């Protein structure tokens, strides 16, 4: 599977010249390196991810859509191990996903009741993500942070609101 550094470096714990250059140039971050080591060990080299984004108190792992469940692991085993090792909350998102998929992955375990397009006076498009009011305490983070992450991943401006339905 695809990891930011090669299998040889993950097995030996020493970066080869190619991976060392990636690390020096900033193509691979320390967070991605740490996550790759954990995933390689727990996934027996069969699980991979494309990149990881460190947002201060949380890390978003971006992987292929079909790999999301494998990175989370059975009962959340792999995500818990990554969280314990790096000391930050971890969210896993499918690469190239649409707004609804990215939002669902980031806001889970809270449930999304709908997504609406809202047009501003200047004609700017925003997306209102409605979360069920009873799930308000289950939203994993501040709405402003989640909106910023969604914009980073999809390029779309969002507003997370609580729905009364």
Image (cartoon, grey):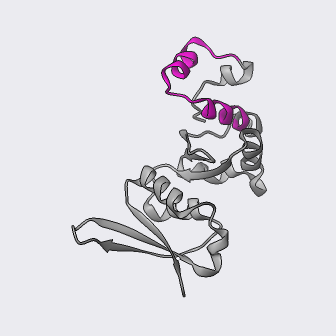
The segment highlighted magenta reads 14-39
Q: Is residue 48 above or below residue 109?
A: above
Position in image of residue 81 (x %, y %): 77, 44
Position in image of residue 101 (x %, y %): 50, 62
Taking the spot 60% from the left edge, 49% from the top edge, the residue there is 67
101 left or right of 140? left
Q: Is residue 157 above or below residue 48?
A: below
* Residue 76 sits inside the magenta stretch: no
Which residue occupies the foreground of this view, 144 or 138? 144
25 left or right of 105? left
Q: Quadrant of the N terminus?
A: top right
Prevailing secondary structure of the magenta residues: helix
Taking the spot 37% from the left edge, 53% from the top edge, the residue there is 155
24 left or right of 6? left
* Residue 17 sits inside the magenta stretch: yes
Position in image of residue 48 (x %, y %): 61, 39
């Amino acid at each position: 599977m695809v990891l930011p550094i090669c299998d040889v470096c993950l097995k030996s714990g020493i970066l080869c010249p190619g991976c060392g250059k990636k690390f020096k140039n900033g193509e691979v971050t320390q967070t991605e390196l740490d996550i790759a080591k954990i995933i390689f060990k727990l996934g027996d080299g069969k699980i991979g991810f494309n990149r990881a984004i460190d947002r201060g108190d949380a890390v978003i792992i971006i992987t292929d859509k079909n790999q999301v469940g494998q990175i989370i692991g059975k009962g959340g085993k792999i995500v818990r191990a990554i969280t314990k090792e790096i000391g930050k909350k971890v969210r896993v998102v499918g690469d190239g996903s649409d707004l609804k998929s990215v939002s669902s992955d980031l806001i889970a375990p809270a449930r999304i009741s709908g997504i609406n397009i809202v047009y501003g006076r200047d004609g700017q498009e925003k997306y209102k993500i409605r979360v069920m009011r009873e799930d308000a305490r289950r939203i994993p983070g501040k709405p402003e942070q989640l909106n910023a992450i969604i914009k980073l991943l999809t390029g779309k401006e969002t507003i997370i609101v609580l729905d009364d339905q």
